[in-house]
Image: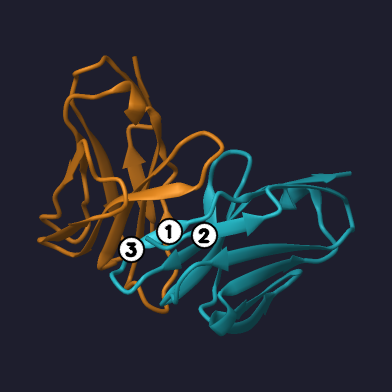
Amino acid sequence: GIQVEQSPPDLILQEGANSTLRCNFSDSVNNLQWFHQNPWGQLINLFYIPSGTKQNGRLSATTVATERYSLLYISSSQTTDSGVYFCAVEDNFNKFYFGSGTKLNVKP
Amino acid sequence: NAGVTQTPKFRILKIGQSMTLQCTQDMNHNYMYWYRQDPGMGLKLIYYSVGAGITDKGEVPNGYNVSRSTTEDFPLRLELAAPSQTSVYFCASSYSSLAETQYFGPGTRLLVL
């Protein structure tokens, strides 16, 4: 299967700071998504982004498919951004592979 | 729409017992997925389905079975539960696997003792 590596594994930010999360994957993919899992375990899709750049409020994401990586930018972080951010990729056989996540803690 | 619902929320099983985790979606999605999430880890795909009557194995299918008799329902069956199956199980759905996002249920926390 496709290997998905996320960095950093843990991140502590002061409220208002910016951050960049990275996702590297080992093979070409049909689909790439970023998810946020809040401290209560709920998973929410943030972006579907197999290539290019998208923005949604304070969050934006960029995927460079030819170089097999994606970046998630969080600007002006808030305490509600805390949780775990997962990158997931889909191979040519409709199978999804998740990274181990980046655990973000935003302090007030 | 209720979205993706899962039952039960929490269950304790004894080693060797069997159970079925229920998953239902009311969004008329074709694709449905079962994942498990072990503590501090990402999700691993157990089984998936691209439509009623069609299922296929994911990354970690051993010890599980699924069926997809309707578009709405995608139950996950555990036969002969083992401690290694202690995990949180998430069901998800999407209209298709391409250009569509996955919507997740709230999860089922399973403890096998």
Distance (Cα) linking label 1 and label 2? 7 Å
- Give me the residue at 58% from left, 66% from top: A24
Q: Secondary structure at mark 1?
A: strand
Can you tell which of label 1 and label 2 is closer to the viewer? 2
In this rendering, do the residues under marks 3 and 2 share a single chain?
yes
Residues A64 and B14: in front is A64
Instruction: Classify residue B17 by image quadrant.
Output: top left
Can you identify the residue that label 1 sits on? A97
Letter of the chain that mark 1 sits on in the rendering = A
| Circle 2 residue | A4
- Secondary element type, mark 2: strand
Q: Label 3 sits on what residue type?
A: Lys
Estimate the spatial distance between the alpha carbons at disc 3 and disc 1, rounded to whole Å: 7 Å
**Label 1 Cα neighbours within 10 Å, binned few <14 / some 14-19 / many ≥20:** many
| Tag 3 residue | A95
Residue A18, image quadrant: bottom right
Q: Nearer the viewer, residue A69 or B36?
A: A69
In the image, residue A35 sits, relative to residue A83, either above or below, namely below
Can you give x and y, in whole percent of width and height, for residue B28 in the image? 27, 67
Residue B105 seen in this snapshot: yes
Q: On residue A27, which mark appears?
A: none
Q: Amino acid at mark 2?
A: Val
Residue B75 position within the rendered picture, expressed as x and y whole percent measured from the top left: 21, 44
Residue B54 location in percent, x, y? 13, 62
Q: Which chain is cyan?
A: A
Circles 3, 1 touching at the beta carbon (< 8 Å) = yes
- Sequence-wise, the earlier of marks 1 and 2 is 2
Does mark 1 fall on the same chain as mark 3?
A: yes
Q: Colour of chain B?
A: orange
Q: Chain of mark 3?
A: A
Residue drawn at x 62%, y 46% is: A38
What distance separates the C-alpha of mark 3 from that of mark 2? 13 Å
